[in-house]
Amino acid sequence: MRTCTELQDPPLHSLHERCTGVGFGVSLRRVQSLDHYFQSTYDRVAEFYDDLWSPNVKTPNDRLTRDLHLRRGERLVDLACGSGAATLPMMRLIAPGETVAVDPSENMLRLAVERAAEEGLHLLPVRSKAEDFIADAPAHSFDVVSMRFALAYLDWPRVLPAMGRLVRPGGRVGILTSLATSAPQAMATYQKFAEHLELDTVAEPPTPREIDPVLDLLGRGGLVIDTCWQHNFRLWFKSGVDATRWLLDTGYITHPALSALEGEIKDAMIELFGSHLEDGFREDEGVPLDFFFAGVIARR
């Protein structure tokens, strides 16, 4: 069981701790072979992803959608659309304009298409990695480009400058990302856990530590920053084991080494990690995990 409370937003550029959330420090710029693993991870978690993850990010998702100022008849692409939880609210605003949904997970795309069909909306699904779609799509072919919680899975210093070519004059690009400072309790536990087991750790985070690099990279692609903001919140769990299972079941922790763990061995590792997490961070309300997100709207 988890509950969600809002943390007061600190200044946008004030977070400099060296820790990471998604991937626990796996650098995708070094490990390109992770693509298949990430795809299979989200195929696996698709059925319960909306129950475990989507309710916790509704507030920043809604804010990004509002800030895009969507208009009826516009053409939209939602990169890394997942199950469509954030795609459908955008579809409703631009209908009868076309919405293209891009995701490498077949199961996630299927859910997004089904959700749209239930509302009588037509969603055009494209099974692709976001970076491949950005590279292959015709220039100036969309009024709006949305990409949420995808930076951990792609080479964002290379991809972000290329996003500007997709949008028409007056078009907007919306980015929502977890910052590398997210889940510091889990990251600190991971570092101690790895040291205890004499495992190698990777210090470089897969997402930006602060929003400045994202702003700069979008600017290189010919975009002008319209607005940016930070959203922080805390999740509470009854135990360290519950928190660990949530991190795994949502796909927030993704690492190829996890795929080799099954049955009793995997359960034992979860119990061990969870006990370290609980010993280090339990408070009266339970075991907390803090998350730090940033949203950006840029215009051409």
Image (cartoon, rainbow, N blue to C red):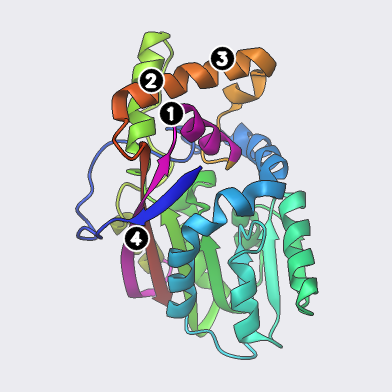
Q: Which residue is mark 2?
A: 276
What is the x, y in percent for residue 286? 36, 36
Tell me the mark number nearer the camera, choosing from 4 and 3.
3
- Dot 1, how many residues are within 10 Å of its Cα: few (below 14), some (14-19), or many (20+)? many
Among numbered discs 3 and 1, the one appearing first in the sequence: 1
Question: Does residue 225 appear to the left or right of 177 in the view shown?
Answer: left
Q: Which residue is mark 4?
A: 231
Q: Which residue is mark 1?
A: 240
Looking at the rendered structure, the kind of residue marked 4 is His
Element assignment for label 2: helix
Element assignment for label 3: helix
Among numbered discs 4 and 1, the one appearing first in the sequence: 4
Residue at image coords 22%, 56%: 13
Magenta segment: 221-249
Tag 2 and tag 1, C-beta contact below 8 Å: yes
Q: Nearer the viewer, residue 182 or 200?
A: 182
Element assignment for label 4: strand
Tag 4 and tag 3, C-beta contact below 8 Å: no
What numbered label is drawn on residue 268?
A: 3
